[in-house]
Image (tube, grey):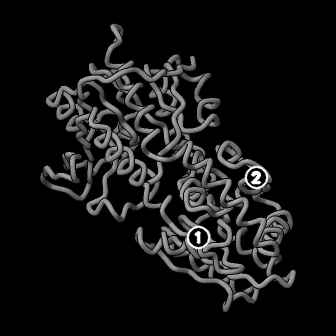
Amino acid sequence: MIAKVESSGPHRPIRVALFSRYPQNPTTPRGGIESVTVALARALVRTGEADVTVLTLESARRHGSAEHDGGVRILRLPGSRWPQWADVHFGPGRARLVRQLLRLGPDVVHTHETHGLLLGDLPLPHVFTLHGFDTENLRADEASLRRVRAWLWGRAERRGLRQQRHVISITPYVRRRIEPLTDATIYDVDNPVDPCFFDIPPQPLHGRVLCVGWLNERKNSLGAIDAFSRAANNGTPARLVFAGTAKDPAFEIRVRSRIHERGLQDRVELLGHVGREALMAEFARASVLLLPSRQENAPMAVSEAMAAGVPVVASNRCGMPYMIDEDRTGFLVDPDDPAQIADRLHRLLANPDLALRMGAAARQVALERFHPDPVARKTLEIYRAIAGRVDR
């Protein structure tokens, strides 16, 4: 069932409990979920219509703490040392989170993290945002014991979705995947991007290709190197920049070996993890963002690049076709076709005017879809609809 929420007049502030990840330093989030949570929480507070408390579960923490980020209250709870697949079902982390939510008694609970998937029976109005399919991520990452772990997470995902009454879908790809698995009301809301990305002045360096995210199989980092090698061999002056790290040291060795095999030692930079300011500087310098991933829902790197006015070359899989307008804001490519990826890179790098036009179009789309203010307004209307329902 698809729900459309219409805007209504002014209301009293609604008390919202957001369960997600929240960085210790909100200006340096690590990963998409932290970025989304910071942008959404701050935008909700800016409306003046929401009282927002963010709850986190942190496995390294022994004692809880209360903090503030401007008008956002943050309650950091000790997590669990149980394996996550067990803790989300019946572990001490789940129990601690539920107790705190019941103690707060908010008007609505909005969960983003995996524990929220199994909170469909929570006796409070609750909406869950699904950011990823762990089953697919494990397969695409070629993780150790991936078959067993994917099976366990697949069972958790199916069980959790059956329990949900309200789900926010961040892309039509997610909605299409979950509709057969749930009777929940599904709301379509894009992930928000921090407003700072819209303020980046484009100053592209000719031929600078940027890849943002983990170095791994799922992001197809090796495929990006192969495609770039072909584009560079076309005579196009180009430089490939990776902003991200490898969780698996063995994979980083493979990346460095591939760079050496292709003779690209002087044309590829491995920056490792970069903070917010450094990432913004990279977007300002980028001629194009390259993301040939094999599995993504709605990658933040794409929406952030669009906000910064950078054209995107990304995979034609999963949620990315719903973010990129082919030939207008970027190009969609087969992640397993390095010749096609190289061709699209060459088109943009050889024609800076085309890249600038595509980047400007991408920024306009991002303003309409990904700016946190309209996202927060849509989300607030969903909260009010859920909190006002009789069948909670």
Q: Quadrant of the N terminus?
A: top right
Q: Which residue is most to the bottom?
A: 266
Q: Is residue 71 above or below residue 306?
A: above
Q: Is residue 338 shown left or right of residue 368?
A: right
Q: What's the residue at 30%, 47% (across, down)?
A: 82
The spot of residue 140 in percent (x, y) is: 63, 53
Q: What's the residue at 37%, 35% (across, down)?
A: 116
Q: Amino acid at mark 2?
A: Arg
Tag shown at residue 202:
1
Q: Which residue lies under the disc numbered 2? A: 328
Q: Which residue is most to the front?
A: 9
Q: Is residue 178 shown left or right of residue 165?
A: right
Give the crowd class for mark 1: few <14, some 14-19, many >=20 residues within 10 Å.
Answer: some
Going from the N terminus, do you reach mark 1 or mark 2 first?
1
For residue 338, say whether it is visible.
yes
For residue 254, say whether it is visible.
no
The spot of residue 269 in percent (x, y) is: 59, 83
